[in-house]
Image (spheres, rainbow, N blue to C red):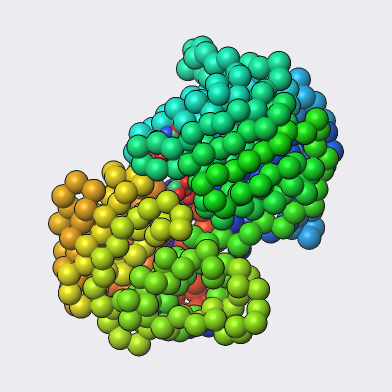
Amino acid sequence: MDCFRIEGPTRLAGRVRINGSKNASLPLMAAALLTDDPLILRDVPDLRDIRNMASLLEELGCSTSREEDGSLHLHVTDPSQSHARYDIVKTMRASICALGPLLAKRGYARISMPGGCAIGDRPIDLHLRGMRALGAEIKLVGGDVVATAPRLVGTTIFLGGPFGSTVLGTANVLSAAVLAQGVTVIESAACEPEIVDLASALTAMGAKIQGAGTPRITVEGVESLSGADHRVMPDRIEAGTYMIAAAITRGDLELENCPYDSLLAVTDRLEVAGIDIALTDESSDRNRAVVRVRAEQRAKPIRLTTQPFPGYPTDLQAQMMALLTLADGNSVVTEKVFPERFLHVPELSRMGAQLFRQGATVVVPGVERLVGAPVMASDLRASASLVLAGMAAEGRTVVQRIYHLDRGYERMEERLCPLGAQIERVDDATLEG
Ligand code: EPU
């Protein structure tokens, strides 16, 4: 199994291009099931989760191919198979994205129920509530959700849950409503930029959608959708991770293709922590901007609460916590989206961080230095936080189970090393002692 061997401390400097968004790509890929025509997606990152979604689509009769220019071509050739089996769903929860498109286009979907995962329970009750409201009959058969509806019918659906809106739940209901009969209103819809990106691709396919990016989305169902050629938005979580990487190494990075306006809650917190962030060209597209991130001093402590968009994203909580372990004072981090998402806490502590957790809050009295140690990646974003901590720590850090990181970051070591990091990917069987 691969691990990262990181030597620190290092300082990052230079330019890095942000890839297309993983979390936008997954529901966009599932949208290929909504049409008989080809769907072309550009800037889809080459990641394990994306390959898993492609395998799932193949099983559902949708051919997938990556062309030389990097674009992903998706085309349904055999609509007879509508069963997403456990073997694939267990590798990737986002398989649930196929539910809405299958139901809307084929009138039938059978999707293995996703289990819990390292960051919490992750129920799908809101997805199912949405499909039922659109008229689907839903049963649980042998661990699979079996949904049927000869034709979905539009209605008003409240999609809020105990932790606020749901991103993939909104994507699923939106993708189903585009082919429903009549008008659907989704109230308490997720406002994440990935939903706006999905709505813009669906609109290019012929859907009639208003209000994407606000808590109320209105969809007027159409009879059929065509194909489209869509460029995926840049990955705001990858961009935020590299911003924090610049900050924790007291470096100087320029991020190209950076979705600046989707990261305002993050740049706000970084600026309060004393990090210098600037658009290099104010007149450029603010969602594909060049952004310079510089840190000359030790970070100042901050208070941070994760929230659905436009609040601070849960997917950047672990990385920011790595930075705060080295801040000059006491920080407080509260997780309001996935209250159990703290698997990085014991691992950062192994590197000398001071972290005191009480429920969904962690108090972080900053220390002057972190010390390299063997640590274990346990989920995607926790792994990223350990890599950042490893680059700032003194000595050698070995991050095991790096396959979690590979689910969401394309060859992170190959992108960080030219910027000054010292990271080697090695097979952990070859490590001494
Ligand atoms: N929730 C429910 N019922 C549901 C669905 C969600 O109670 O039916 C709860 C969840 O348990 C959680 C909250 O609602 O407490 C928000 O979950 P959400 O549904 O928004 O999460 P998701 O759509 O399953 C996506 C991203 C996650 C990201 C969250 C929150 C993808 C593929 N995944 O998940 O990304 O953390 O939104 O922003 O888009 C990651 O990339 O590392 C990752 C985990």
123 on left or right of 327? right
Give the residue at x 17% y 69%: 330
240 on left or right of 369? right
Judge by depth and name the residue closer to the eye, 332 or 253. Answer: 332
Q: From the viewer's perspective, is residue 276 above or below residue 95?
A: below
Can residue 259 be seen from the camera position used here? yes
Give the residue at x 48% y 41%: 188
Judge by depth and name the residue closer to the eye, 318 or 392. Answer: 318
Q: From the viewer's perspective, is residue 274 above or below residue 115?
A: below
399 on left or right of 92? left
Task: Determine the image quadrant of residue 415.
Answer: bottom right
Ligand 1 position by quadrant:
top left
Give the residue at x 37% y 77%: 271
Q: How many marks?
A: 0
Which residue ends up furthest to the bottom in the rendered image?
A: 296
Name the spot of residue 123 as percent of width and height, x first: 41, 31
Name the spot of residue 306 as percent of width and height, x first: 35, 55
Name the spot of residue 68 as percent of width and height, x first: 79, 58
Judge by depth and name the residue closer to the eye, 104 or 115. Answer: 104
Can residue 374 be seen from the camera position used here? no
Name the spot of residue 220 as percent of width and height, x first: 71, 36
Give the residue at x 49% y 60%: 237
